[in-house]
């Protein structure tokens, strides 16, 4: 496998997992948060984000971590495998809390974006097993014959 997408809820450990997997397989790792967020937690506009992601995944070897359901179709069309980190809600919320506790005020996700917790993000993490996973499953159905799905 040379092109792998790592997806799952916030706090599931996607970035850590992708980094370790990239080291083990000798593949470059692309952390989508680093490219999506601009200083002050300013999101990249949709059209620009799709163009950016097309460039990011144009290579023949990569591991990409991040969800971004609006561009999941681009990644799945190129990926050879998808690794889903399917942890329970409480583990993901604990992961979010640990990240905040250990890195509060530091730019972990993207430059100029200090680590924080807000209610909108916590809601997204809580609802991921139903809402986010449903979007992921629907997108996977379009690529299921061409892609290996590994759920952890």
Image: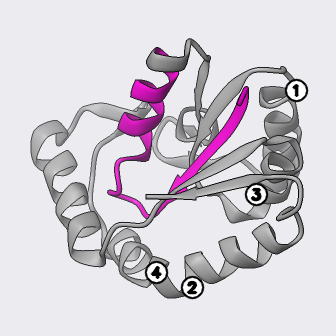
SS for callout 1:
loop
* 4 or 123, nearer to the observer: 4
Q: State which quadrant residue 111 falls in.
A: top left
Q: Is residue 124 left or right of residue 136?
A: left
Q: How is the image coloured?
A: one colour
Does the magenta-highlighted stretch encompass residue 49? Answer: no
Residue occupying the far bottom of the picture: 130
Quote the CA–CA distance across marks 1 and 4.
Answer: 30 Å
Mark 1 residue crowding within 10 angstroms, few (<14) / some (14–19) / many (20+): few
Label for residue 129?
Answer: 4
Label for residue 58?
Answer: 1
Quote the CA–CA distance across marks 3 and 4.
Answer: 17 Å
Residue at x 47%, y 77% (from the top left corner)? 128
The x and y percentages for residue 50 are: 85, 47
Quote the CA–CA distance across marks 4 and 2.
Answer: 6 Å
Quote the CA–CA distance across marks 2 and 1.
Answer: 29 Å
Going from N to C along the chain, the mark reached first, 3 or 4, is: 3
On the image, numbered disc 2 is attached to which residue?
131
Does the magenta-highlighted stretch encompass residue 9? Answer: yes
The x and y percentages for residue 104 are: 17, 42
Going from N to C along the chain, the mark reached first, 1 or 4, is: 1
Going from N to C along the chain, the mark reached first, 2 or 3, is: 3
Q: Which residues are magenta?
A: 1-23
Q: Is residue 53 visible?
A: yes
SS for callout 4:
helix
């Amino acid at each position: 496998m040379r092109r792998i997408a790592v997806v799952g809820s916030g706090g599931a450990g996607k970035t850590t997992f992708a980094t370790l997997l990239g080291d083990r397989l000798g593949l470059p790792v692309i952390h989508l948060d680093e490219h999506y967020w601009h200083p002050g937690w300013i999101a990249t506009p949709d059209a620009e984000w799709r163009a950016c992601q097309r460039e990011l995944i144009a290579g023949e070897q990569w591991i990409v971590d991040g969800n971004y359901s609006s561009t999941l179709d681009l990644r799945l069309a190129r990926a050879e495998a998808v690794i889903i980190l399917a942890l329970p809600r409480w583990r993901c919320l604990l992961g979010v809390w640990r990240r905040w506790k250990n890195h509060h005020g530091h730019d972990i996700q993207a430059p100029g974006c200090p680590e924080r917790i807000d209610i909108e993000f916590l809601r997204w993490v809580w609802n991921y097993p139903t809402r986010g996973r449903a979007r992921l499953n629907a997108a996977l159905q379009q690529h299921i014959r061409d892609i290996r799905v590994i759920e952890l």
